[in-house]
Image (cartoon, rainbow, N blue to C red):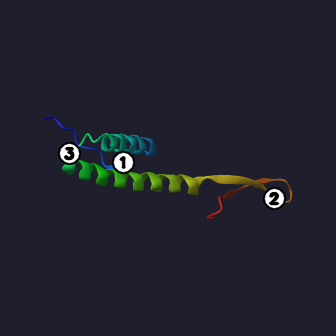
Amino acid sequence: MNEQAEPTIETLSFEAALAELEAIVQRLERGQLDLEASIAAYERGTALRRHCATKLEEARLRVEKITFDKEGKAKLEPVDEA
């Protein structure tokens, strides 16, 4: 069997990681994997979910909102950490 090595999770974009996670969920839901492959897929899926959550948090922290000072000049402020 000619299996390709899975890409390192840390190198995946959010979109690629999410697409792979969705594919893993579909295979698990359909019962397309044997027990060992299911466990490996679940572990990779967990790591992918964590990676996606980290990428979303990084994006959230980069988002800035525009506010105006008393003179009407625009200034950038980081989004509240709430």
Q: Height in image: 36 above or below 82?
A: above
Quarter of image, res 27: top left
Residue found 25% across the figure and 49% down from its top: 38
x%, y% of residue 72?
84, 53
- Quarter occupied by the C terminus: bottom right
Query: What SS does tag 1 mark?
Result: helix
Residue ID at (31%, 44%) = 28
- Give the residue type at disc 2: Asp
Q: Secondary structure at mark 2?
A: loop
Report the residue at 46% width, 56% height from top: 54
Question: Residue placed farthest to the left in the image?
Answer: 1
Task: Quickly name the residue at label 2.
Answer: 69
The disc placed on residue 11 is: 1
Q: Residues within 10 Å of mark 1 (few under 14, many from 20)?
A: few
| Crowd class of label 3 (few under 14; some 14 to 19; many from 20; radius 10 Å) | few
The residue indicated by pointer 3 is 34
Is the residue under label 2 in contact with that under label 3 (CB below 8 Å)? no
- Going by the numbered disc 1, the residue's amino acid type is Thr
* Above or below for 55 versus 18: below
